[in-house]
């Protein structure tokens, strides 16, 4: 109670005594007044506060005032409550508060810390409802200018209610999609999506109504012209449903057609060859892997252009690029619908021919491709002609992606070698897929140190006396699962896996172990691979092996082939065949030219190297009785050899008729199944004891 006595009036008199009740004044105040403690828990509100919020004082006492503050404004209020303790009067702030009826109001509040004031002991907050004022402020702005800017904006702007119905829209919607604004307002925005796209937009609107952050989505929107293409639109939805002024979902949107086009272009560039437009290696690998995962058969066709480099060198790179584009067009035309054509290298292409189940179909496709690509090309710079080497590999349930490509690549190189007249891989090697070769290579790498590869010895017979003058060492692999394998099954594999040096050493060890206790006049024939002839350490290792068995190098006959060996030259870190052959001759070994007649420069080799023996290839020996040409070749070789003082060995003698013909021609030596099959180490001594002096005893064939 406040008592005021003797207050002078304007006439110089004194007014009557005035009694003012401060509590009554507070209760009569038009602005809400709250008292909160330092934890922002409500301790008091006057009737104006009850009227503002719609809660009676007793319903809210003891509860945090933050419960009625909009979630987006809580951080701001907390920060303001901390600063009010540092000032006589806090800084006014505006915030949204929820009323008991669930609506939101804008309220301006200002606080004063009175924590130490008796009877207060808290923070006094005076509030004022400014919802109407904010509406007036919006209305008092330059709305004409704002509306003009909004209508001319290139971005779509819409205001939706809680159900996604359009209540306001700018002209960009009409300019972009053609729909009149009067036909948009009052309709759900999702109604303007193309069929099937409305679900994504509706879901985004539902999420936005419960979100405090913007929600984005894309939807395909239809144009008013049914013949015109739809437009991809990216929407950003902001939830202002709780804003007393806006009270809706504010949606901004823009056309992302250019973005989609750029994305498609980038995706195409990432998955296609820029020069030819064909699929690139990554697409090939992806589709081949998916095809194999579905257990579907296919043919993988590897294509390499022959004589492409001369086109580049003579006519320029532009002509080379033009040629590659034409090649790509021809490949597109020659393959079946659904087959994939990919460019995987400079002049290399791969075709994935789906659902090819037999080799004949794949081979026909390869022949079609080869014929098509071998036709003349008319380029801007003039006509050119190139050919193609084509290899085919069929997939099966064990095929891997890398295995299929490796098989096709190998087949292509075999085709290229055949075209050039170079030696090709064995049939066993060609028909074995990459996985099988890898497993067999692993087995060989493990089996060599275990002594699984041994030297079988086949006698070389003097046709004049019938005596055995030497034995040729032939590798046999005692595979633990596959049994005894002949060289044709694994020699190419050993070279590819880099095991040929170790294999050669193991064969020499095995042959020397067998020959050491035998007659010192018998010689050992040993075949050397390309890799062995290029190995700098070969002669040193051979000396060591021979010495360990107390064998002289003079007992060793080195057998080399024309094509696979003599055409090679030295590479980095390696030596030439000529260097190795010369070093072997200085050791005391003798040299034999194997498979004579199958090469293209045999006479040159005879003149160049110090040969002691020539072996006539079995392909001529097999026809010596029935084909005059073969007999003539054998006779010519024998005559040439005698003139040069070189011995001749006929390989592959299997019949008495062949033996008689070779004897008549004057051949010196022979070997073959007629005399003996290759002998296991344990069989050699027994055979020599019985047949070494004269093979013309009982002809007993030994098992392989």
Image (spheres, helix red, strand yellow):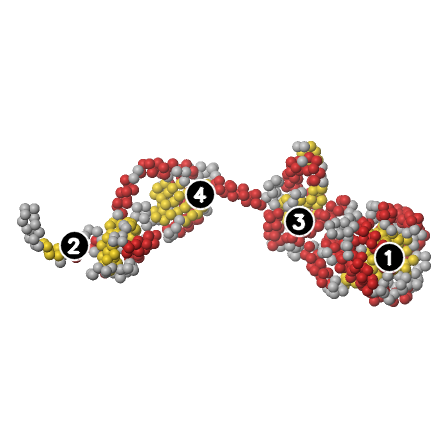
N-terminal-most mark, 1 or 2: 2
Local secondary structure at mark 2: helix
When asked about the image quadrant of residue 267, the answer is top right
Mark 2 crowd level (few <14, some 14–19, many ≥20, 10 Å Cα) = few
Residue 424 location, x and y as percent? 76, 50
Residue 289 location, x and y as percent? 61, 52
Local secondary structure at mark 3: strand
> Real-space Cα distance between discs 1 and 4?
87 Å
Report which residue position mark 2 lands on.
25
Local secondary structure at mark 4: strand
Q: Count the marks.
A: 4
Relative placement, left or right, of 607 versus 359 is right
The answer to whether residue 489 of the structure is visible from this angle is: no
N-terminal-most mark, 2 or 4: 2
Which residue is drawn at the image coordinates 86% and 57% (left, top)? Answer: 588
N-terminal-most mark, 1 or 3: 3
Report which residue position mark 4 lands on.
233
């Amino acid at each position: 109670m406040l008592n005021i006595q003797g207050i002078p009036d304007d006439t110089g008199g004194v007014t009557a005594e005035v009694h003012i009740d401060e509590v009554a004044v507070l209760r009569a105040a038009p602005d809400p007044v709250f008292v909160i403690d330092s934890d922002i828990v409500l301790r008091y509100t006057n009737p104006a506060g009850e009227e503002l919020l719609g809660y009676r004082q007793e319903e809210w006492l003891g509860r945090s005032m933050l419960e009625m503050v909009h979630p987006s404004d809580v951080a701001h209020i907390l920060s303001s409550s901390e600063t009010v303790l540092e000032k006589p009067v806090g800084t006014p702030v505006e915030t949204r508060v929820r009323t008991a009826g669930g609506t939101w109001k804008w309220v301006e509040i200002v606080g004063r810390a009175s924590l130490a004031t008796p009877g207060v002991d808290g923070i006094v907050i005076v509030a004022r409802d400014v919802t109407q004022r904010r509406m007036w402020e919006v209305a008092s702005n330059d709305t004409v200018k704002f509306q003009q800017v909004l209508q001319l904006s290139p971005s779509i702007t819409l205001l939706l209610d809680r159900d996604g119905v359009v209540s306001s829209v700018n002209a960009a919607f009409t300019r972009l999609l053609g729909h009149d604004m009067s036909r948009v307002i009052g309709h759900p925005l999702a109604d303007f999506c193309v069929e099937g796209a409305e679900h994504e937009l509706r879901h985004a609107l539902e999420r936005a109504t419960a979100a405090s952050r913007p929600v984005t989505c894309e939807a395909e929107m239809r144009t008013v012209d049914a013949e015109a293409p739809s437009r991809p639109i990216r929407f950003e939805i902001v939830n202002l449903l709780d804003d007393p002024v806006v009270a809706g979902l504010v949606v901004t949107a823009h056309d992302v057609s250019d973005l989609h086009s750029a994305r498609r272009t980038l995706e195409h560039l990432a998955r296609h060859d820029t020069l030819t437009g064909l699929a690139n290696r990554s697409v090939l690998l992806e589709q081949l892997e998916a095809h194999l995962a579905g257990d579907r058969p296919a043919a993988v066709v590897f294509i390499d252009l022959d004589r492409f480099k001369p086109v580049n060198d003579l006519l320029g790179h532009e002509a080379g690029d033009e040629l590659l584009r034409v090649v790509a067009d021809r490949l597109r035309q020659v393959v079946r619908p659904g087959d994939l054509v990919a460019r995987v290298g400079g002049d290399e292409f791969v075709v994935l021919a789906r659902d090819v189940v037999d080799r004949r179909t794949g081979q026909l496709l390869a022949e079609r491709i080869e014929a098509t690509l071998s036709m003349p090309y008319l380029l801007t710079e003039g006509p050119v002609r190139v050919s193609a080497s084509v290899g085919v590999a069929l997939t099966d349930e064990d095929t891997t992606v890398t295995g299929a490509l490796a098989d096709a690549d190998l087949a292509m190189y075999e085709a290229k070698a055949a075209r050039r007249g170079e030696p090709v891989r064995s049939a066993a090697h060609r028909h074995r897929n990459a996985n099988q070769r890898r497993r067999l290579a692993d087995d060989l790498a493990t089996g060599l140190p275990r002594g699984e590869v041994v030297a079988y010895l086949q006698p070389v017979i003097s046709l004049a006396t019938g005596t055995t003058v030497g034995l040729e060492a032939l590798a046999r692999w005692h595979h633990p699962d596959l049994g005894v394998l002949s060289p044709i099954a694994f020699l190419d594999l050993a070279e590819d896996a880099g095991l040929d040096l170790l294999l050669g050493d193991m064969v020499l060890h095995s042959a020397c172990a067998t020959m050491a206790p035998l007659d010192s006049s018998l010689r050992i024939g040993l075949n050397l691979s390309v890799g062995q002839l290029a190995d700098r350490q070969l002669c040193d290792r051979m000396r060591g092996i021979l010495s360990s068995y107390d064998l002289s190098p003079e007992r060793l006959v080195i057998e080399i082939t024309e094509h696979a060996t003599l055409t090679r030259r030295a590479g980095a870190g390696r030596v030439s065949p000529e260097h190795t052959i010369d070093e072997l001759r200085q050791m005391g070994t003798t040299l034999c030219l194997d498979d004579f007649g199958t090469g293209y420069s045999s006479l040159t080799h005879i003149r160049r190297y110090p040969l002691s023996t020539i072996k006539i290839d079995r392909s001529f020996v097999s026809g010596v009785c029935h084909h005059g040409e073969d007999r003539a070749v054998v006779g010519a070789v024998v005559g040439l050899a005698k003139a040069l003082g070189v011995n001749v060995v006929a390989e592959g003698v299997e019949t008495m008729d062949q033996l008689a013909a070779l004897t008549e021609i004057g051949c010196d030596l022979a070997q073959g199944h007629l005399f003996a099959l290759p002998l296991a180490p344990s069989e050699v001594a027994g055979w020599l004891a019985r047949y070494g002096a004269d093979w013309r005893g009982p002809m007993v064939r030994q098992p392989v």
